[in-house]
């Protein structure tokens, strides 16, 4: 698989197939990030297209030899924030389970690009996405980038346009809040007898 | 489960490219990519030529011969340094990355603003005959220096904004402020070599204030050009 730097350089030289290859490489990860941020597949799809259109218009800003992926993530991040502001809501609300990310599955029902990974419990995935939606946007972004997308703190800070220290704090707070929320979800609903006993 | 204890999320499959993007790709042409160091060199050269032209038309300060040469030279080098450093952080990213050094750009803005205001307030030698002393009473009359300083800052800021067009999805305000502070220092240099009003209030708050005002104006306006659309 070609390097994102080479693909971006070839694309800037006028090679459209390099752009398609770059899209194929980056778009799934980026869409995953946007779905977790926006909690809507439809919104995330739209943001993804907007992101790549912005990348296309701003391709002359590319610095040869640089990794374009953090920059593309930053554009996606900014596009998400602008969209969230545009609809005057910090969190874009979504419908129910229909909006869980779609995935290409093989005959065994496993995602095409995650066949080697252990399958996630769908209930746990949904609970995590629900809990993520309750976090403030900055903490959600920090958790998604550092804990779910596997980016380093430095990469996440570059994407969000903040300092490494601030990103560490956001990720830590977000992760702690997420753990509490998931713990609460796992504990609920409390047994009626125990709840009644607690009041007496 | 991932290492963090959170579930591994399935990667969604993106849809194909939009019709609009396909149409754009159909007419794809090569573009000249950004070369930060070259852009910095152009920005510095154009700004210095512009500053020198302004000085040529405005004339050098009348009290120059009566002021200590070491002070004139040291402060001029200081202004020049104040022009170069924020512009460098605003334009040149770390190797292997595309985003300029936002944190350092921010630090450069704050340091330049505080340093040049303080320096002007504290150190401001006057010639006994040719320097003017406006003092606090006539402080307001120094507004033409502010205007001249901002006019000098215009070229570095505009050139920097053109070079960074569409390049900054995040952190554009800090980068814009750094361009503004750099331009403000260019303005400060022009004023240092032109203006013979030498009291501390004028030199500190007007000449040094150009850095602050220019950074603020730039941070308010320039991101419209530097954010991808």
Image (cartoon, coloured by chain):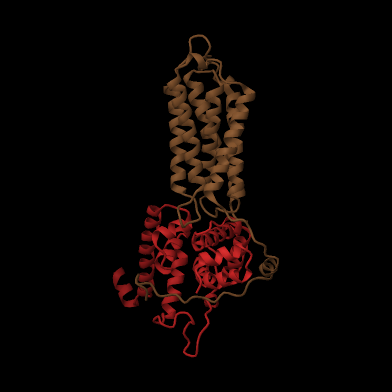
Which quadrant holds the C terminus of chain B?
bottom right
Observer-nearest of A130 and B165: B165
Which quadrant holds the N terminus of chain B?
bottom left
Observer-nearest of B86 and B7: B86
Q: Residue furthest bottom?
A: A107
Q: Is residue B41 left or right of residue A183?
A: right
In the image, residue A152 sits, relative to residue B162, either above or below, namely: below
Q: Position of residue B28 (x, y in %)?
A: 67, 65
Q: Quadrant of residue A200?
A: bottom left
Residue drawn at 51 percent across, 22 percent down = B202
Q: Position of residue B77 (x, y in %)?
A: 46, 30
In the image, residue A83 sits, relative to residue B68, either above or below, namely: below
Residue drawn at 52 percent across, 76 percent down = B12
Q: Position of residue B29 (x, y in %)?
A: 67, 62
Observer-nearest of A185 and B9: B9
Residue A173 visible in the displayed image: yes
Q: Is residue B82 left or right of residue B32?
A: left
Residue drawn at 43 percent across, 74 percent down = A127
Q: How many marks?
A: 0
What is the letter of the brown chain? B
Q: Colour of chain A?
A: red
């Amino acid at each position: 698989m070609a390097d994102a730097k080479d693909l971006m350089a070839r694309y800037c030289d006028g090679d459209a197939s390099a752009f398609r290859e770059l899209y194929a490489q980056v778009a799934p990860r980026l869409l995953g990030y946007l779905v977790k941020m926006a909690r809507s597949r439809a919104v995330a799809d739209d943001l993804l297209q907007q992101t790549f259109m912005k990348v296309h218009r701003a391709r002359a800003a590319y610095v040869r030899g640089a990794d374009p992926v953090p920059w593309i993530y930053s554009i996606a991040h900014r596009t998400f924030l602008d969209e969230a502001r545009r609809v005057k809501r910090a969190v874009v609300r979504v419908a129910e389970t229909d909006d869980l990310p779609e995935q290409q599955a093989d005959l065994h029902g496993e995602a095409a690009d995650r066949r080697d990974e252990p399958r996630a419990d769908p209930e746990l995935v949904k609970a995590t996405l629900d809990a993520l939606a309750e976090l403030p946007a900055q903490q959600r972004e920090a958790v998604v980038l550092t804990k779910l997308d596997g980016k380093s703190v430095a990469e996440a800070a570059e994407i969000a346009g903040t300092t490494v220290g601030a990103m560490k704090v956001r990720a830590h707070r977000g992760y702690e809040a997420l753990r509490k929320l998931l713990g609460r979800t796992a504990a609920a609903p409390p047994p009626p007898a125990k709840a009644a006993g607690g009041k007496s | 489960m991932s290492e963090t204890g959170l579930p591994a999320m399935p990667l969604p499959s993106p849809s194909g490219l939009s019709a609009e993007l396909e149409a754009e790709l159909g007419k794809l042409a090569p573009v000249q990519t950004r070369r930060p160091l070259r852009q910095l060199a152009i920005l510095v050269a154009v700004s210095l030529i512009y500053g020198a032209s302004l000085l040529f038309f405005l004339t050098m300060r009348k009290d120059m011969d009566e002021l200590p040469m070491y002070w004139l030279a040291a402060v001029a080098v200081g202004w020049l340094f104040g022009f170069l450093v924020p512009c460098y952080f605003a334009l040149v990213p770390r190797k292997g990355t595309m985003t300029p050094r936002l944190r350092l750009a921010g630090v450069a803005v704050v340091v330049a603003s505080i340093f040049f205001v303080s320096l002007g307030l504290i150190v401001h030698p006057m010639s006994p005959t040719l320097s003017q002393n406006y003092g606090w009473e006539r402080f307001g009359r120094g507004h033409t220096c502010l205007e001249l300083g901002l006019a000098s800052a215009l070229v570095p800021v505009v050139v920097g904004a053109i070079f960074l067009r569409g390049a900054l999805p995040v952190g554009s305000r800090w980068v814009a402020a750094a361009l503004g502070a750099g331009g403000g220092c260019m303005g400060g240099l022009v004023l240092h070599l032109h203006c013979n009003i030498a009291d501390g209030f004028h030199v500190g708050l007007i000449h040094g204030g150009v850095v602050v005002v220019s950074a603020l104006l730039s941070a308010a306006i320039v991101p419209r050009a530097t954010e991808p659309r």
